[in-house]
Amino acid sequence: MTSQKIEMPTEDWVELIDELAKWHVAIADQSARNANPCYPRAGLTQEDEEGHQIYTEQAKIKIEQAAEDIEHILAHYKAGA
């Protein structure tokens, strides 16, 4: 089976992978909370000193791991990869 390759600027490709990784981690976190009432309620974000919502260190690690997996999966579809 031949698949068409996706052509897009590298910056857009990186942003796509980042957004999919964040979405994946948020869905997985919500699913864990729904499946287990004892799941820690710490959340994926916290408030910084300036009042902005930022990802926790644990969430950043999960997002980075998800991004690597997503990049590996999508690499088959990227033109020039």
Image (spheres, rainbow, N blue to C red):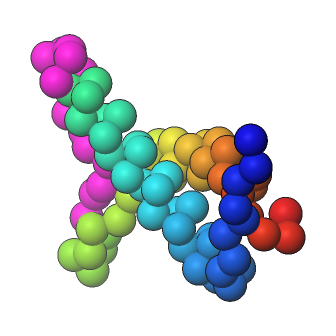
Q: Can you say which quadrant of the picture contains the C terminus?
A: bottom right
Is residue 8 found left or right of 23 in the rendered image?
right
Relative height, residue 19 to residue 36 (above, below): below
Using the rendered view, name the quadrant where residue 7 is placed. Answer: bottom right
Q: Position of residue 15 (x, y in %)?
A: 55, 73
Relative height, residue 57 to residue 81 (above, below): above
Q: Position of residue 20 (x, y in %)?
A: 47, 56
Q: Residue at x 70, y 62 (%)?
A: 4
Question: For the stretch drawn in magenta, what is the main secondary structure?
Answer: loop
Is residue 73 found left or right of 23 in the rendered image?
right
Is residue 75 found left or right of 70 in the rendered image?
right
Q: Can you say which quadrant of the picture contains the N terminus?
A: top right
Using the rendered view, name the quadrant where residue 48 is placed. Answer: bottom left
Q: How many marks?
A: 0
Q: Residue at x 30, y 55 (%)?
A: 45
* Range of residues picked out in magenta: 34-47
Q: Nearer the viewer, residue 75 or 56?
A: 75
- Do we see residue 40 in this rendering? no
Using the rendered view, name the quadrant where residue 8 is placed. Answer: bottom right
Q: Position of residue 33 (x, y in %)?
A: 21, 26
Relative height, residue 69 to residue 64 (above, below): above
Outermost residue on the front side: it is 1
Q: Nearer the viewer, residue 39 or 79?
A: 79
Q: Residue at x 16, y 24 (%)?
A: 34
- Do we see residue 63 in this rendering? yes
Q: Residue at x 31, y 40 (%)?
A: 27
Q: Say whether residue 81 is magenta.
A: no
Is residue 35 found left or right of 17 in the rendered image?
left
